[in-house]
Each structure stands twice: as structure tokens, then as C-alpha cells.
Image (spheres, helix red, strand yellow):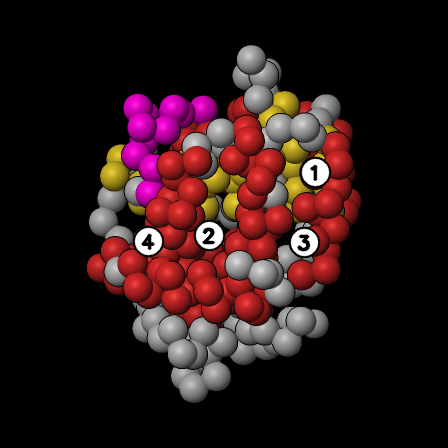
């Protein structure tokens, strides 16, 4: 049976690579991107549907969810792949710190707006996290916006840890209803990922030597593809964190159910959800 697979952040990088791999295998792929031209180009090349949504604007996330619910009677995989690292602390039009909103709050909102459809479909929800969740966070549940202390690296690490916490809480709340959640580290990918930042992140991702040492987008995309094609409970364990297609270590804080629950509850309030 052909499955419907929605991939955000699919206008380039590992999202576009995975979309191509899955489309070639005959899956019904839906690409979502921020840039209209790039997103349309990927969709046109693959012959698949596309939607445009900027995750720094939660109203666009709500519009995206409504469009997906209207068009697709089932959604078998939701790959929350959109994200980024940014430079100086800035706020979105919603008034939230940009790194937090784009990497965590927007996909949290999208997943919850699609939740009933995902449960009905027995779907897998895949979060593109990072080893940064273990290496860089100074996670403070009372300072999710980085108002007390901010650096681009810390904000990114905190957001990627939030992805893992969200994955585990999603599994705890809805796993028994048939929803499977997993998070993964795609590798340090040779892409334009750091272009929205400055300092060391931009140097890392734009330097020609560093680019040669990084993982290709096709390999990183294949790790997303492996999870999308895999059977939960057989090929990968729901609630887990993966790297190189194997269970991997992440922050110890990710295993704290109290923090995960607190993050869920506070995110629901910030996103304007009832629960």
C-alpha cells in the first residue's frame, strides 16, 4: 500500500534528498518548505504535491495543517524535519525566540493539529534532532525563550533537546493509541543549514574543507528515509533516539518524564492549544 509521507524542510538538504528517495520508491510524498520557488522546484522535479509554510509564523503552520487535513484522508508519516540555527537572539512575529519556535514550537503545533488524523492512520512521527541535544544544551524549563542567557549554540542545543523530549512525551501520551514517535541525528550534513547564522556555525557549514568532511545530504536523507520506511517496534523502537540507524545516546535530561511533561504543557499554552 502506498503511504502518504509529509516532510517539512523539504525544499533542500536532507528533506529534499529523502523526498526524492521515497518518491522513487513509489510513496506519496508531500514536500513542505519555506521558500516558494525552491519548494515548487523540488515538487515539480519529483512530481509530488507541495505546500509552503514559514515556521517563524504560527498562523502559517495552522494554515498548513488545515490544508493537509483537507487533502489527505490519511497521513502515514509526518517528518518534522524543518529547523535551523540562527545568530543573534531575535523574536518571531508571534513574539517567541526564533530558534525555539522554528525547531520545536512550530512542529509541536503542527503535530498536535494533525494528531487525530495521525492516530487514525497509525502514523509515525519523526523528529530531526541532533547530537547537539547532548553536546550543547543548558536547558531551563523556566527560560525556554533564552531571555536570561542566550547564545546561538545553546539555543540550538536546547531546541534539539526539546525535539527529543517532545518525541518521548508524544510516545508516552499516544503510543498505546497507535502513534509511533522517534527522533534522530542525521549527521553533520554538507548543506546550507548554517547560512542563517553567523560566527562558528556559518564558518563550519560554509568552509570548503569542512564541507568535504561532512556527511552528504543523500546519506543524511537516507537516515530519514530508513525511519520513514521502517516498522515501529521492529526496525526501530518508538520513543527512541537514533544515529546511523542505531539507538544512540542523547542528553540524560531527555529521560526525565517530569521535564518532558512540563515542556509539553508550556508549549501547548504558547502554541494556543487547549491541551
Q: Judge depth for marks 1 and 4 and give the one in front.
A: 1
- Circle 2 sits on which residue? 208
Q: Nearer the viewer, mark 3 or mark 2?
A: 3
Say how many tags the image has: 4
Q: Earlier in the sequence, mark 1 or mark 4?
A: 1
Q: Earlier in the sequence, mark 1 or mark 2?
A: 1
Residue 106, relative to residue 116: is it above or below? below
Secondary element type, mark 1: helix
Q: Is residue 24 above or below residue 80?
A: above
Q: Is residue 138 visible?
A: yes
Residue tagged by mark 4?
A: 131
Q: Is residue 11 magenta?
A: no
Give how far apart the Cα atoms at labels 1 and 2 are.
42 Å
Helix, strand or loop at disc 3? Answer: helix
Q: Which mark is residue 232?
A: none
Q: Quadrant of the N terminus?
A: top right
Question: What segment is highlighted magenta in the picture?
Answer: 229-239
- The residue closer to the viewer here, 65 or 55, is 65
Which callout, 1 or 3, points at the residue further toward the start of the chain? Answer: 3
Task: State which mark lies toward you, 3 or 4.
Answer: 3
Q: Position of residue 128 (x, y in %)?
A: 45, 46
Where disc 2 sits, the SS reads helix
Q: Which residue is mark 1?
A: 69
Q: Quadrant of residue 258?
A: bottom left
Q: Could you tell me residue 7's position as x and y percent?
A: 58, 38
Question: Spatial distance from mark 3 to mark 2, Cα to Cα?
Answer: 35 Å
Separation (CA) of disc 4 from disc 2? 22 Å
Q: Residues within 10 Å of mark 1 (few under 14, many from 20)?
A: some
Residue 222: percent from the left, percent from the top?
Answer: 44, 30
Amino acid at each position: 500500500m502506498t503511504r502518504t509521507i509529509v516532510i517539512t524542510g523539504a525544499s533542500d538538504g536532507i528533506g529534499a534528498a529523502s523526498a526524492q528517495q521515497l518518491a522513487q520508491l513509489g510513496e506519496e510524498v508531500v514536500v513542505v518548505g519555506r521558500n516558494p520557488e525552491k519548494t515548487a522546484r523540488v515538487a515539480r522535479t519529483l512530481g509530488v504535491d507541495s505546500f509552503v509554510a514559514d515556521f517563524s509564523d504560527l498562523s502559517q503552520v495552522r494554515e498548513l495543517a488545515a490544508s493537509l487535513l483537507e487533502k489527505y484522508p490519511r497521513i502515514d508519516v509526518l517528518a518534522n524535519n524543518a529547523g535551523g540555527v540562527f545568530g543573534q537572539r531575535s523574536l518571531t512575529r508571534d513574539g517567541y525566540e526564533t530558534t525555539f519556535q522554528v525547531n520545536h514550537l512550530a512542529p509541536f503545533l503542527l503535530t498536535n493539529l494533525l494528531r487525530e488524523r495521525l492516530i487514525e492512520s497509525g502514523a509515525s512521527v519523526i523528529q530531526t534532532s541532533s547530537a547537539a541535544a547532548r553536546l550543547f544544551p543548558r536547558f531551563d524549563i523556566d527560560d525556554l525563550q533564552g531571555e536570561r542567557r542566550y547564545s546561538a549554540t545553546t539555543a540550538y542545543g536546547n531546541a534539539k533537546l526539546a525535539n527529543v523530549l517532545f518525541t518521548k512525551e508524544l510516545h508516552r501520551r499516544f503510543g498505546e493509541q497507535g502513534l509511533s514517535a522517534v527522533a534522530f541525528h542525521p549527521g553533520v550534513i554538507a548543506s546550507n543549514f548554517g547560512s542563517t547564522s553567523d560566527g562558528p556555525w556559518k564558518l563550519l557549514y560554509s568552509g570548503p574543507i569542512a564541507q568535504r568532511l561532512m556527511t552528504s545530504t543523500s546519506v543524511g536523507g537516507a537516515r530519514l528515509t530508513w525511519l520513514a520506511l521502517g516498522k515501529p517496534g521492529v526496525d526501530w523502537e518508538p520513543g527512541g533516539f537514533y544515529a546511523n540507524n542505531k539507538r544512540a545516546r542523547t542528553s540524560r535530561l531527555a529521560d526525565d518524564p517530569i521535564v518532558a511533561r512540563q515542556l509539553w504543557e508550556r508549549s501547548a499554552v504558547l502554541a494556543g492549544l487547549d491541551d
